[in-house]
Amino acid sequence: MPLLEVRGVTRSFYGVHALNGVELSVEAGRITGLIGPNGAGKTTLFNCITGVVPPSTGRVVFDGEDITGWRPDRISTRGLVRTFQIARGCPRLTVRENLLLYGAHQPGEGVLTALLRTRAALAREEELQARAEAIAARLRLTQVLDNKASALSGGQKKLLEIGRALMTAPKLILLDEPCAGVNPSLTREIGERLREIVAEGISLLLIEHQMDTIARLCDHVIVMAEGRHLTEGTFAEVAANATVQEAYMGRPRWAS
């Protein structure tokens, strides 16, 4: 059974059809790329999957459970989380605090527990601290752990965005252009970290416009155009597909 299934999902905004019956599946244990020209509906699809906006019609099934119309926090708790194209960390908090903010089962979320400071609450806080430090080390953020998020470079902010997702102990992470605006050396480093994440049992669905990154990282590639699933396969297969080339480059005049 696929880890994620999208069945006939549509979404309209003021009469404009952003998604037109999208059908796709994401298998566990690999990096799946989601590509397509600007306006293809990729980010809108992410929003529908993660509950930011509800689908107009259709179903989203995650890990065997229909999550269509669920709130984003409930979906995240289930193990499906996302990052955003523009890193959305809390700029006045440190890297450590940003990571801790996303840890599950926070003792401070209950007033009584926060006031009593029970042994169990203190133990959980220590667990979250250790997890945040381990994730920072994995993403090469240890040196900036106590720096404000606003002081990070663009690439470090992207890594922090991934780190915050990892703090939730996810099964699947949806990544919206994790390498956008990042220099080539840091792009390669982000790619290495993503491969390590998959090796640890977390699956990834990745939107990216840098085709060399898609070719290097993705085990499987899904192509969207005009709000629909167009085709899928290995990167070599979709890159050689004439329909995909037309979607990206436009129909040649001589073919009209």
Image: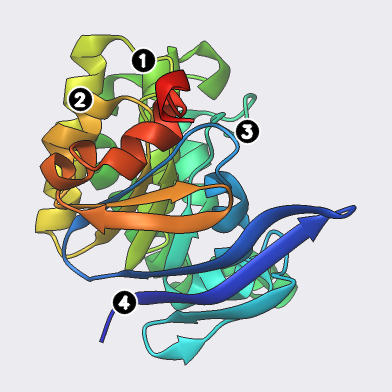
Q: Residue at x 20, y 25 (%)?
A: 212
Amino acid type, callout 1 = Val
- The mark found on residue 90 in the picture is 3
- The mark found on residue 212 in the picture is 2
Whichever of callouts 2 and 1 sits on the residue coming sooner in the sequence is 1
Residue on which the image places disc 4: 3
Amino acid type, callout 3 = Cys
Q: Nearer the viewer, residue 252 or 10?
A: 252
Q: State the separation of the CA atoms marked 2 and 3.
A: 31 Å
SS for tag 2?
A: helix
Q: Residues within 10 Å of mark 3 (few under 14, many from 20)?
A: some
Q: State the separation of the CA atoms marked 2 and 1.
A: 14 Å
Cβ atoms at labels 1 and 4 below 8 Å apart: no
Whichever of callouts 3 and 1 sits on the residue coming sooner in the sequence is 3
Q: State the separation of the CA atoms marked 3 and 4.
A: 30 Å
- Regarding residue 23, the answer to whether it shows in the image is yes
Which quadrant is home to the N terminus?
Answer: bottom left
Q: Is residue 173 left or right of residue 137?
A: right
Cβ atoms at labels 3 and 4 below 8 Å apart: no
Q: Is residue 90 left or right of residue 218?
A: right
